[in-house]
Image: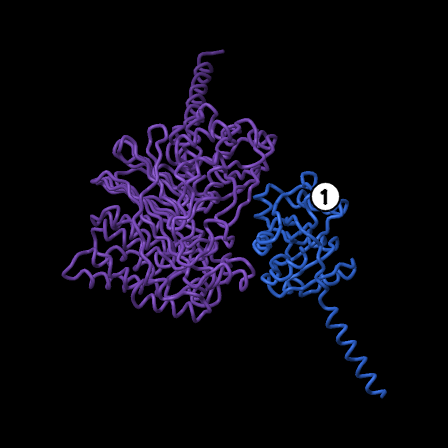
Amino acid sequence: MNKKALAALVLSATVLAAGAASANTMYYKTRPTISGKVVAHGGSPAVAKAGMEILLQGGTAFDAAMAMAAAQSYSEVMMCHIFGGDLQLIGYDAKAKKVFSFNGTGWAPKKSSIEFHMEKTNAEIPVKGIYSMHMPGEWSGWMTFLAKYGTMPLDKLLAPAEKMAREGIITDDFLANMIKGGSEGMNDEAKAVFWPNGEALKAGDVYKNVAYADLLKTMGEVAAKGAEGKTLADGYKAAEDYFYRGPLAEEIVKWNNENGGDFSIEDFNEFHAEETTPITTNYRGIDVYCTPPNSQGTVLIETLNTLENFDLKSMGLNSAKYINVITQALQIAINHRNRFSADPRFFKYPEGLLTKEFGKDIATNHIFPDKAVEAIPLGEEKYFVDYNKKGPDTTFMFCADEAGNIVAVTHSINHFFGSGMMFKGIMMNDRRIQYSLDADLPNSLYPHKRTVQTITPSIALKNGEAYMAFGTPNADRQEQTKLQGFLNIVEFGLRPQAAVETPRVATDAAGDTASNNKYPKQISYMVNYLTQIDEKVIKELSDMGYKMAPTRNTGSLGLGVKENGFWSVGADPTRNAYTYAW
Amino acid sequence: MKKFMLALAATLAFAACAFAEQPALTALGSPALLTPFGQSQDANAVKLMTRKLAVDYDMTCFADKVDWSKYKSLIVVLGGSGKGLGAAGLDIPTELERCKNLVAAAKEKGVKIIAMHIGGQDRRGPNSEPFLGFMGDADFAIVRADGNADEYFTKLCTEKNVPLYTIEKTGDLRKVMPELLK
């Protein structure tokens, strides 16, 4: 071989080797991890933008969260509404070094009853319509939170959403698809917004909700008046009272009753959201916090306590053994949620179930890494012996500011477009369907009782400092998705975007908040990311006895990790999740 | 006299028709085993309606695992649900096999079968259709009127000689079931 040919051969080999090396370092994901000292992440770009506007004006994460939620109630109106839905909020006060939470779950109307639904709605709570809704608690949750943590006037916080709703934004593909498929049960006001002139809004059309914009303006004005000569907190209180103890409550009750519903003025007048104490556990040195019952945060806490007893890293991410173990752990925790969780004012969740001792007992005696189980175990009774009566379609966002404050929020009107009924721009929830009509279950329907919520945002601290914020929509799969995102970071060292885009699994076999399915041998696995779960793993799990079902939906995970003073955030491409960070 | 006799005959014929519309609620016995055929949540509604009666509820009981000596009746609630089938790890063919085996085992053991369809038009779609024919295997059938607007169940039960009781709303089961399960 002559020298020129040899040189060409060596050069070609070098180029090929360099190409192969760079290919080996490529992540199979659709978008980059976004990093910054300040972050606003939400289920859609409009939400992130609203948060960014407030943060750039000097607002805190606490202020930005309100702005983002108001915008989200417009851009993601099919999933949440600050006036028509429910709220679970968890935050970190950097100054006080304290994790806190707020519960803005509404409650069942005073006139509602199991008997009514057994007789009048064919023994089931309808998904759409006037009897699908309960009294929304979210606005009280926000005002109660801001009264303690807000630093800006309410009208400023609501301004970004008011502008969008009044002037309009472009309907995106996701919203357009939802409108096309979600018109069932819509009342005239909702149809006027989503089906103007009898045709569904299409991607690219301008989408407005002027009635919602007017209500936001009114609330801002009420708060401003309430704060005159007093404090911002007085202003937020005035806005809360306007909704629950003022003209808006009267209007909503009148509208509800005119449509055959069962709301009473007392449902609103007597309601107050509350600050709660997060539940927590330490997983391999990381303190993980979730909102407490009536949210389903117990599922994540209990599952982590169980999984800590396994060497998950050596099992390998998404190996058959790994998927089998986390599935069994999740099914047990979800089964406990269905069996014991309720409004804490009615039933106390057994604290024994959230202990590491119980987690170890479950791991040792009830989880079988190499085979599927025939039934979901409850565990030893001594851990829930103190269970007793005490006494009477969602989205996620989080933001962090330069001071280190964090707010993570999951709020929801339940199914897409909730009840389908809109009033004064408010998309009303269909949360009532989450109550059970079985009087023997703790989550049974009862007047002025709050249902078990699947909405559950989380925060984690490491060495007492902010470390992670994460959450997702998707009902009974929320904690399952959050768990896998968390483990992808903590056990397997993935970068946030990779952690979010690694295919997840989910099991529906433990049932939901209103009933109990108990068929353990079922796993759904995601197929819509660039990487897939290995076919061999699917086969191994099938051979164990699992029914494996492909799915395209296990939520829309948002996950941020604090590293070297910056937040690095992963945004799920399954829906329209988006992050601004700088 | 002739006119009187004609009038009497017409009255008797009318009365006969009126009483023939709903079959008598004969006691088929309890305890009963309740299960969905198709995995819809309609069976859950029946469970709620019968919670004060001797009824065991099992969403995925298989014929060879049932202790038939415990039961006098088998209550099957017809209606398919994709979500329910998925959560149970079943597909339509395997669920149909389960249902067929349960019917065969119940008949062999002399256990009476009560079949019901109470989900209205929502349970007349493609997921439900494969399970509707099981009503023809029952000893007694109950249908909610809005699910039988096309008289599908009426024709099936007439052909198979199954007494068919029609209810207007699911809540009516609270009057019907105690009589059937005596």
Circle 1 is placed at which residue position? B101
Tell me: residue A395, above or below residue A28: below
Left or right of residue A18, residue A548 in this image = right
Judging depth in this view, the residue of B148 and A61 nearest the camera is B148
The number of discs equals 1
What percent of the width, then of the height, locates residue A181?
Answer: 51, 56
Residue at image coords 23%, 61%: A223
What percent of the width, then of the height, locates residue A142?
Answer: 30, 53
Q: Quadrant of residue A31?
A: top left
Q: Tell me how the rendering is colored.
A: by chain
The residue type indicated by label 1 comes to Asn
Tell me: residue A220, above or below residue A301: below
Left or right of residue A353, residue A269 in this image = left
Tell me: residue A557, above or below residue A178: above
Q: Which chain is blue?
A: B
The answer to whether residue A179 is seen in the rendering is yes
Quadrant of the image containing the C terminus of chain A: top left
- Residue placed furthest toward the right: B2
- Residue placed furthest toward the front: B182
Judging depth in this view, the residue of A53 and B15 nearest the camera is B15
Judging depth in this view, the residue of A545 and A342 nearest the camera is A342
Q: Which chain is purple?
A: A
For numbered disc 1, what is the local secondary structure?
helix
Residue at image coords 25%, 52%: A146
- Of all chains, the one bearing label 1 is B
